[in-house]
Image (cartoon, rainbow, N blue to C red):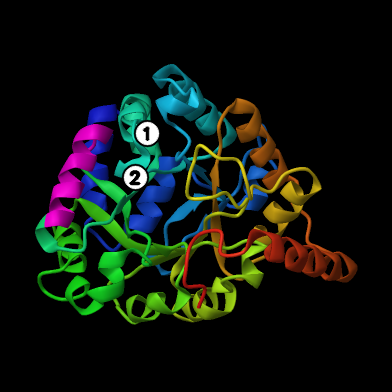
């Protein structure tokens, strides 16, 4: 068995090299789907995250619900993380604006840090502001590095009016590139809930490794990230992670526009069929939701042609009811 301390040090060094994908697979125990199917308990499979070459679990644990005002405790999160690893879910996503989530996670993932693909987000468009968020994230999450950091929510006001500055020498992208040189950040991503056209300048940046737009079979008829962002990102072989696959509003205290019932399975299957998809960022609130997500992904079956037609009709109906659920503009 590897010495945990030596593993941590070597992994930090590995993140600075081009051979990260092979070594990371060994550290995380990631193996091809067909091997997983043949040995041991069935687990959530892994896929390669685009041109990064890194294997990650097909489910990413979304932690936006890990907040005290939603009744979640540090013990709940610890149990959630432990169960994730049992299921083969090694990809975890958080953000500073998720209130207690980063601190809860920092405690929970510390014993398992070498086996987790950890993503966080930055929202300050300036060089210094981004560095400040990175340092705060490292402190709260009790880590000295991240596998992935997103330039998050490209529809935000700072990104709307100052795109050139964000991408310039005094902007947040420059900060993330420098953090990557220092081994603090392995990969840089960008995400968006609305305003798909705002994604375009970021897709042209060679420094961007991963895209995470809001995609589901309903939002397709509202924002259509699938054609406007997903398709061009796939052509560049970016890593593709789907968020908001179950819907959900920006206000976490509300339960509207969240797909459930039969729509739940359809939402998972829709995301699993997206071309080039690597992982589904699924926000869960308890162990039962985590188990349901894992079981649905592990039992995934492609749609029939008739099922796709029915899903298209259902998505259009719900799209009219939802409206601009994540924000304006929708183009």
What crowding class fits label 1: few (fewer than 14 Cα within 10 Å), some (14-19), or many (20 or more)?
many
The answer to which of marks 2 and 1 sits earlier in the sequence is: 2
- Picture quadrant of residue 47: bottom right
Secondary structure, mark 2, is loop
Whether residue 322 sits left or right of residue 223 in the image: it is right
Q: Residue at x 80, y 47 (%)?
A: 262
Q: Is residue 184 magenta?
A: no
What crowding class fits label 2: few (fewer than 14 Cα within 10 Å), some (14-19), or many (20 or more)?
many
Q: Which residues are magenta?
A: 129-143
Residues at marks 2 and 1 touching, judged by CB atoms closer than 8 Å: yes
Residue that sits furthest to the right in the current view? 306
Q: Residue at x 55, y 29 (%)?
A: 86
| Above or below 168: residue 106 | above
Residue 119 % position (x, y): 36, 48
Instruction: Tell me, yes or no, if residue 2 can be seen here.
Output: no
Whether residue 171 sits left or right of residue 288 in the image: it is left
Secondary structure, mark 1, is helix
Main SS, magenta region, reads helix
Residue 304 % position (x, y): 86, 66
Q: Residue at x 48, y 21 (%)?
A: 76
Residue that sits furthest to the top in the current view? 75
Q: Which mark, by number, is residue 95?
A: 2
Whether residue 120 sits left or right of residue 292 in the image: it is left
| Above or below 161: residue 17 | above
Residue 269 % position (x, y): 72, 56
Q: Is the N terminus in the top left, top right, bottom left or bottom right quadrant?
A: top left
- Per the image, the residue denoted by label 1 is 101
Instruction: Tell me, yes or no, if residue 236 can be seen here.
Output: yes
Q: CA distance from mark 2 to mark 1?
A: 8 Å
Q: Which mark, by number, is residue 191?
A: none
């Amino acid at each position: 068995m590897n010495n945990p301390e030596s593993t941590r040090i070597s992994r930090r060094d590995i993140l600075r090299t081009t051979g990260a994908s092979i070594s990371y697979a060994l550290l995380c125990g990631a193996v091809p789907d067909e091997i997983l199917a043949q040995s041991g308990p069935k687990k959530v499979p892994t896929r390669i995250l685009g041109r990064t070459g890194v294997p990650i679990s097909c489910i990413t644990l979304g932690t936006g619900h890990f907040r005290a005002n939603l009744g979640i405790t540090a013990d709940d999160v610890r149990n959630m993380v432990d169960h994730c690893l049992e299921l083969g879910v090694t990809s975890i996503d958080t953000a500073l604006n998720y209130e207690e989530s980063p601190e809860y996670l920092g405690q929970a993932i510390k014993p398992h840090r070498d086996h987790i693909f950890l993503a966080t987000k930055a929202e300050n468009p300036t060089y210094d502001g981004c560095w400040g968020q990175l340092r705060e994230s490292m402190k709260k999450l009790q880590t000295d590095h991240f596998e992935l950091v997103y330039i998050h929510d490209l529809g935000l006001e700072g990104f709307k009016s100052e795109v050139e500055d964000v991408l310039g020498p005094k902007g947040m992208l420059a900060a993330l590139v420098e953090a990557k040189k220092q081994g603090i950040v392995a990969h840089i991503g960008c995400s968006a809930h609305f305003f798909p056209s705002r994604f375009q300048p970021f897709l042209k940046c060679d420094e961007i490794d991963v895209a995470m737009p809001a995609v589901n079979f309903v939002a397709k008829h509202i924002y259509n990230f699938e054609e406007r962002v997903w398709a061009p990102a796939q052509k560049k072989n970016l890593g593709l992670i789907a968020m908001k696959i179950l819907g959900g509003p920006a206000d976490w205290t509300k339960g509207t526009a969240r797909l459930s019932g039969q729509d739940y399975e359809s939402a998972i299957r829709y995301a699993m069929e997206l071309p080039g998809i690597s992982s589904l960022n699924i926000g869960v609130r308890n162990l039962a939701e985590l188990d349901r997500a894992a079981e649905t992904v592990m039992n995934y079956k492609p749609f029939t042609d008739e099922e796709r037609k029915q899903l298209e009709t259902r998505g259009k109906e719900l799209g009219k009811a939802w409206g601009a659920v994540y924000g304006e503009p929708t183009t």
